[in-house]
Amino acid sequence: MKRIPQSMVLITGLLLSSMRVAASPSVQQMSDIEVTEYAVRLSNTIEIVEHKGLCHSNNVSCLRAEFARYGVSYDDKEPVKKRLVLMIGGVF
């Protein structure tokens, strides 16, 4: 009986966080400031996952779930990196 409420809370939390990720605009449509803030959130999430040892680096499904839990998308890592490189290159 105790597992049912725990399962419901876990499922609800995952659904709410994944809805927030799905509702976020694509990286191409973000302003430079939004991309920078999103990159900070991605970086913080990566640090938390690595520090706590929540997932192995080759377990993509676990990484996707943890990223969703923190309100960022695992698939946005590469587009954000590319935008940051372009932004930094534009400064120099």
Image: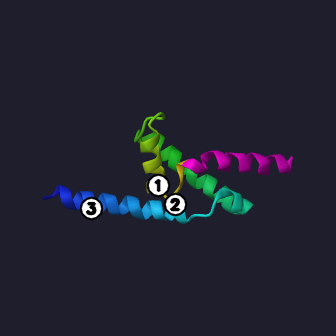
Q: How many marks?
A: 3
Q: Which residue is mark 3?
A: 8
In this picture, which residue range is highlighted in magenta? 75-92
Furthest toward the left, the residue is 1
Residue drawn at x 19%, y 59% is 4
Whichever of labels 1 and 2 marks the residue nearer the N terminus, that label is 2
The CA span between labels 2 and 3 is 20 Å
Residue drawn at x 43%, y 55% is 69
Look at label 2 and name its amino acid. Answer: Val
Is 53 magenta? The answer is: no
The CA span between labels 1 and 2 is 7 Å
Q: Is residue 53 visible?
A: yes
Q: Nearer the viewer, residue 50 or 4?
A: 4
Q: Which residue is mark 2?
A: 21
Q: Which residue is mark 1?
A: 68
Q: Are marks 1 and 3 in contact (CB under 8 Å)?
A: no
Q: Are marks 2 and 3 in contact (CB under 8 Å)?
A: no
Q: Tell me if mark 3 has few (under 14), some (14-19) or many (20+) residues whose alpha carbon lies within 10 angstroms of its own.
A: few
- Residue 42 at x, y percent in the picture: 57, 51
Residue 14 position by quadrant: bottom left
Q: Tell me if mark 2 has few (under 14), some (14-19) or many (20+) residues whose alpha carbon lies within 10 angstroms of its own.
A: some
Judged from the image, the secondary structure of the residue bearing numbered disc 1 is: helix
Look at label 1 and name its amino acid. Answer: Ala
Q: Are marks 1 and 2 in contact (CB under 8 Å)?
A: yes
